[in-house]
Image: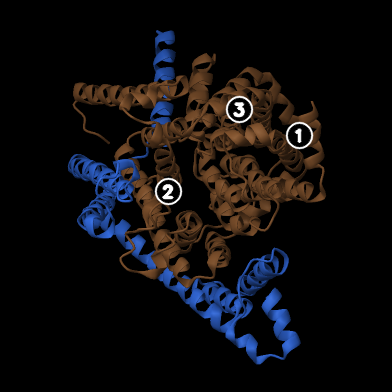
Chain colours: A brown, B blue
């Protein structure tokens, strides 16, 4: 109780309240603009948060992360274009509802599903925090190394049908981390005698290149997207209450999102898929899914919005990011010398609880903003796509150049921008590169610190937590291989090749 | 008979949704993926040839303490997955289509023009200063994109807002340009600090 009160006192500061407001409203607006998305916005804002207090900076970024998913459902439902990639599943049932003249109902259900998902996840995690505080100290260097390894395995196998490309990109990320002077023996690695490579390649430069610059290039090179403000007749607020008719679907979605969000490398897509499939299997009208099923909409939105709070668990408890957005947030911790990991839960529990309370308030603010301002918000859909590209490119420059005032950083970001264009156009994942850079660094450091206690390979699994993680890695790999085998057998039986 | 008909329609509808869901989780293959596969394999191969000269391996040290271990792991991983990706791409391109590779590569090349615009912007900032460079960049690029009238005026306005917001209010570190040196001291200080 004392911790809760201390956390409440922390978040009632004016700067935290300002970050809550800007983050939640800004996130909704950013999410509602197709082609921007939270990754681009967070990448651009990241350097600006380095001068802020850690809680203020993280609240701002978390606000954008969590609230953007609310906003992303608006264009997904009204114009069949997801505001963020995560809202793609929302188009399946949201847009058919709009076509059937039920746009306000679809929006109300989507906002309701998101709200229930987000709040259930936050409440579950606040209740779970004392348990985490007890489990976290059981993670030593070996366990953190193995958890990072699990994250690497998950990010590869989670990309079904693209595991080979994801693996190559993950190892490319690990390679990028190794460039420059290593901190142990101060030897150079792959610097090719170039002084600018001595410090290595900054994660934020890569992030900005892959997410922001590449998105700007794609928008600038694409044909102009006609910006029209869709019409919306009817009350969204009234439809919001209808979500309580689907409370079991929303709760299941929240459970899927929370469970999947905690596992590094899995993320929103898998949680949505599970929640959606589960809701369809339980529905009396499964054939309506994909044709305007309200349960489908609630299942998808509740699952995706419960992932952001859950994704903070491995980040805060172990210092392991699960996807690109939490990887970016990790840099904010490091800049302020707040090291996420087991010690954070033991020594600074009120900071953790304050962060979760901020997430809860962000959900409430985002919902209130949407229920009162959905109609004026629709005007952001009128921003022409190429003009948006110009804005993103101008903002990207601030993010990259303000890091070290380096022209070379901008050139490197430009090169990663071109790589990002290639990957996005081919629908290949960019997340493995970012996780490779971050997890590669964690694994190298943790392996080195584990070595004095490692005599044989069995020393890796001489403690219960490491045994569980190794068992999980083995299970995930076995299931992946079994899945490939089943798919191959199925194709062979049908006489088909891979798509 | 009617029940049977309804059941088959329901099965068909569910199969369609399944297919759409499957494509959402695992997008369709594009022929141009072969370019990515060849490039990633070639880069991995090049890095493998450079490993011994670009890293250090100390005699008598445990592998875990060697500075060259993690680059080795990364390169071996890139080679292994890169080889697999290359073979899979060749097989998929042989069996199925999925868009024209040349058209796609041409689109990637078109983005090169905007990389040039971005780099030009980056290079003029130290000379002209952040605000003038941003105003020039936004106006010129908006003109190149075909905007006229209101949108052409909005572009430098947006640029000015970005400069004031980030440098003026959020105090991001962007040094003043050489052009600012021409102004009297008081104005110069203001320009360096806020614009």
Q: Is residue B98 above or below residue A261?
A: below
Residue A437: numbered disc: 2
Q: Position of residue A56 (x, y in %)?
A: 71, 49
Q: Quick check: A489 left or right of A249?
A: left
- For mark 2, name the chain: A
- Residue A195 versus residue A120: which sits nearer the camera? A195
- For mark 1, name the chain: A
Picture quadrant where residue A404 is located = bottom right
The reply to whether label 3 and label 2 mark residues of one chain is yes
Disc 3 versus disc 1: nearer the observer: 3
Q: Position of residue B47 (x, y in %)?
A: 25, 56
Q: In the rendered structure, which disc, 1 or 2, sits on the residue that comes first in sequence?
A: 1
Q: Position of residue B54 (x, y in %)?
A: 27, 59
Residue A298: numbered disc: 3
Gap in Å between the C-alphas at discs 3 and 1?
Answer: 16 Å
Provide the residue designation for mark 1. A237
* Residue drawn where x is 64% and y is 44% of the image: A62
- Residue A323 versus residue B47: which sits nearer the camera? B47
Q: Quadrant of the C terminus of chain A?
A: top left
Gap in Å between the C-alphas at discs 1 and 2?
Answer: 44 Å
Q: Quick check: A168 left or right of A210?
A: left
Q: Quick check: A364 left or right of A277?
A: right
């Amino acid at each position: 109780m004392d911790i809760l009160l201390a956390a409440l006192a922390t978040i009632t500061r004016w700067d935290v309240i300002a970050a809550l407001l800007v983050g939640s409203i800004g996130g909704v607006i950013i999410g509602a603009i197709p082609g921007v998305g939270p990754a681009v916005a967070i990448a651009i804002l990241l350097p600006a948060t380095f001068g802020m207090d850690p809680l203020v900076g993280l609240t701002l970024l978390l606000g954008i992360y969590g609230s953007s998913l609310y906003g992303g459902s608006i264009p997904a439902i009204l114009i069949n274009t997801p505001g963020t990639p995560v809202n793609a599943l929302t188009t399946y049932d949201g847009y058919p509802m709009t076509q059937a003249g039920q746009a306000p109902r679809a929006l109300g259900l989507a906002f309701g599903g998101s709200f229930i998902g987000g709040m259930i996840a936050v409440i579950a995690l606040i209740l779970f925090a004392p348990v985490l505080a007890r489990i976290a100290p059981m993670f030593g260097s070996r366990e953190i190394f193995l958890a990072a390894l699990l994250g690497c395995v998950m990010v590869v196998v989670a990309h079904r049908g693209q595991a080979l490309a994801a693996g190559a990109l993950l190892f490319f990320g690990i390679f990028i981390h190794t460039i420059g002077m290593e901190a142990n023996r101060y030897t150079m690695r792959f610097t090719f005698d170039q002084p600018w490579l001595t410090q290595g390649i900054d994660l934020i430069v890569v992030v900005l290149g892959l997410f922001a610059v590449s998105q700007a290039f794609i928008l600038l090179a694409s044909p102009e997207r006609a910006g029209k403000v869709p019409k919306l007749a009817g009350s969204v607020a009234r439809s919001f209450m209808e979500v309580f008719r689907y409370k079991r679907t929303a709760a299941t979605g929240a459970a899927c999102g929370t469970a999947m969000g905690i596992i590094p490398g899995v993320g929103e897509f898998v949680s949505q898929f599970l929640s959606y499939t589960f809701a369809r299997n339980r529905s009396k009208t499964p054939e309506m899914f994909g044709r305007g099923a309200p349960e489908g909409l609630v299942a998808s939105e509740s699952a995706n919005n419960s992932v952001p709070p859950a994704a903070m668990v491995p980040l805060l408890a172990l210092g392991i990011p699960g996807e690109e957005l939490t990887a970016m947030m990790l840099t904010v911790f490091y800049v302020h010398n707040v090291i996420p990991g087991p010690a954070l839960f033991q020594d600074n529990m009120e900071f953790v609880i304050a962060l979760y309370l901020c997430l809860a308030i962000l959900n409430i603010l985002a919902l209130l903003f949407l229920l009162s301002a959905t109609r004026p918000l629709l005007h952001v859909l009128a921003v022409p796509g190429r003009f948006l590209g110009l804005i993103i490119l101008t903002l990207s420059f601030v993010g990259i150049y303000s890091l070290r005032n380096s022209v070379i950083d901008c050139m490197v970001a430009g090169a990663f921008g071109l790589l990002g264009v290639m990957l996005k156009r081919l629908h290949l994942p960019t997340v493995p590169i970012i996780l490779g850079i971050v997890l590669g660094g964690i694994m190298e450091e943790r392996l080195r610190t584990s070595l004095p206690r490692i005599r044989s390979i069995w020393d890796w699994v001489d403690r219960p937590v490491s045994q569980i993680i190794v068992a999980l890695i083995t299970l995930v790999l076995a299931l992946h291989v079994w899945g490939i085998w089943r798919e191959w057998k199925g194709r062979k039986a049908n006489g088909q090749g891979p798509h | 008979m009617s029940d049977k008909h309804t059941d088959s329609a329901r099965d068909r509808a569910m199969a369609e949704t399944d297919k759409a869901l499957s494509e959402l989780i695992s997008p369709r293959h594009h022929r141009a993926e072969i370019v990515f596969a060849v490039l990633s394999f070639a880069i991995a191969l090049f890095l493998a040839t450079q490993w011994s000269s670009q890293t250090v391996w100390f005699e008598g040290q445990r592998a875990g303490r060697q500075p060259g271990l993690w680059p080795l792991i990364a390169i071996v991983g890139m080679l292994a997955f890169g080889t697999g990706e290359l073979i899979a791409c060749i097989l998929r391109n042989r069996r199925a289509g999925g868009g024209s590779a040349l058209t796609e590569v041409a689109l990637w090349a078109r983005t090169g023009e905007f990389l040039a615009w971005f780099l030009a912007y980056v290079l003029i900032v130290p000379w002209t200063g952040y605000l003038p460079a941003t105003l020039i960049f936004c106006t010129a690029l908006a003109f190149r994109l075909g905007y006229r009238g209101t949108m052409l005026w909005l572009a430098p306005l947006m640029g000015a807002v970005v400069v004031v917001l980030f440098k003026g209010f959020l105090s991001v570190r962007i040094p003043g340009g050489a052009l600012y040196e021409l102004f009297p001291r008081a104005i110069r200080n203001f320009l360096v600090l806020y614009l």
